[in-house]
Amino acid sequence: MTRANLTLPGCWGAVIFAAVSFTPSLLPRGGLLQGIVCGITAAIGYGLGVLAAWIWRAFADRGVRATRPRSWQVFAISAAVLLAVSFGLGQYWQYEIRRLMGIDEYNIALVVASPFIAVLLFGLLLMAGRGVRRLYRWLARTLRRWIGPRAAAVVGWAVAAATVYLLLTGVLLQGLSNAADAAFSVRDTITEEGVTQPTTGLRSGGPGSVVPWDTLGREGRTFAASGPSADDIERVVNHAAQEPIRAYAGLESAEDAETQARLAVDDLARAGGFDRADLLVITTTGSGWVDPALIDSFEYLSGDSAAVAMQYSYLPSWISYLVDQSKAREAGRALFDAVYEHWIGLPADARPRLFVAGESLGSFGGETAFSGEFDLRNRTAGTLFVGPPNFNTLFREFSDHRDSGSPEIQPVYKQGRTVRFASDAIAEIPPGGQPWEGNRVLYLMHGSDPIVWWSPNLIFSEPDWISEPPGEDVLDMVWIPFVTFWQITADLPFSTGVPGGFGHKYTEEQVDAWHAVMRPEGVTPDVLATLRDTIGKD
């Protein structure tokens, strides 16, 4: 049944899975990434093929039989044709995705190399799988000295599986996480080129600030030292504006999240942030980054604003997304609670409008301070969550309990009375014709954003967003067990490597999102168009 130590059922599984790995996902895939996805899915297909054959033999009560040479010949011809057709269709689909997103970059050398990359990775994974099998067999033989053969087989598989799991999660994953944390903690000490310490007391790290400049971290220093000036705002919105206040606390600013949050709020109060018309609480992404498009749009539309944020990790958002979620939860709750405690103690007629925002993992952290729709509406003047991860608690609650007939890519919750969803807020935000009164909550999310749609559930179940008509920025997709999960997983690290308006890259669309949430007076369509251009160029 084998040739070159490969089984025919396993080879059929590998070829079928390799072929379907060329189907499109959310983002363009270069040759290197396609080779990786193809190699992983082929290895999974091989394993499933071997498993299916074993189950069939068990039910048929027969042993392994030698495979006829003609069966291998049929397989070789069929595999060559299937893979060639799949490869060609895959290149066409990738061209269509690039055209849809306006991407011209195309590395033909990597495309040619992708089959070799796939074969190499498939071979490595096959060797690893056989190593696990040898471990199981050794354990089973050893255990037979004390227990029966069937029990030994079961216990052997359990121990082998547990060993692999512990190695991957406890050694490999934790080791990679620790290495990344060490590497990015060094990066956090570096200041971006062109970023200088503020000379105004309106910024953390500036004169009189209670947060030292060198403790803000790389992204905190960029946040405190950048942004539009009052003159910049006046030129765009055509009315008087105040210099924006920005308060921030880095990981090195305090020992724990609660102390860090109180320090940021103390600096915010010192600078006069609670005396402004609008106050924004931001939960950052993993590295402490605040998207300039998010904060700048808010400051332009307000004209009299203050903002506060804090860092909770050294890791980039996509790594924090996988290993650092608890820190985002703690930071989001600690910062909002500290701000709210000060804010609620002010006279009602002296309080600024209190807004909340977060992008990517920051939206996850921002949500954790609230219990649901009414809590968001009652304790804030408005909320904007951008590119929410699929595991966000409130996002999932609102999406899973959406009104009948509304699609998952743009759900309608409770007729849109408080919470709404949009991929681009320039057009009317659904549901059209329904009142959106009181304080507003808006989720901004692209149909092509893998952060929004990635979930372990993709392994075994088809989500509604694939079975429903796709968004305007996505090709028709087909859900395939295991394969789709790895395709979307492979999209994650490259989710921002696309033009604005696609993937996880949110730029000028945040202007209209904030306009919908804040409802500022005197902002004309011409002003919004100018502001979109301004944000899009930054």
Image (cartoon, rainbow, N blue to C red):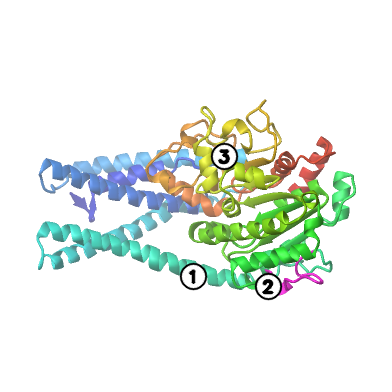
As displayed, is residue 213 above or below residue 222? below
Q: Is residue 441 left or right of residue 178?
A: right
Question: What is the spatial separation of the Cα atoms under label 1 and label 3, in whole angstroms?
Answer: 33 Å
In magenta, the rendered stretch is: 203-216
Left or right: residue 307 compared with residue 235: left
Task: Give the secondary structure at mark 2.
Answer: helix
Tell me, yes or no, whether the highlighted magenta stretch contains residue 411: no
The x, y position of residue 514, in whole percent, is 72, 43
**Label for residue 215?**
2
Mark 1 burial class by Cα count in 10 Å: few <14, some 14-19, many 20+: few
Closer-to-camera residue (333/536): 333
**Precedes in sequence: disc 1 or disc 3:** 1
Q: What element does badge 1 sit on? A: helix
Q: Which mark is residue 178?
A: 1
Snapshot quadrant of residue 97? top right
Number of the label disc, if any, that sits on residue 199 = none
User: Residue at the location (53% across, 69% down)?
Assistant: 181
Q: Are marks 1 and 2 in contact (CB under 8 Å)?
A: no
Measured from the top left, where is residue 304 in percent x and y? 82, 51
Q: Check if residue 212 falls in the magenta segment.
A: yes
Q: Position of residue 520 (x, y in %)?
A: 79, 41
* Amino acid at the residue labelled 2: Thr
Q: Residue furthest top?
A: 433
Tell me where residue 30 appears, x and y as whole percent. Answer: 52, 50
Report the front residue among 3 and 265.
265
Circle 3 residues within 10 Å: few <14, some 14–19, many ≥20: many
Q: Does the rendering let one see residue 27?
A: no
Residue at mark 3:
447
Amino acid at circle 3: Gly
Looking at the image, residue 390 sits to the left or right of residue 187; the answer is left
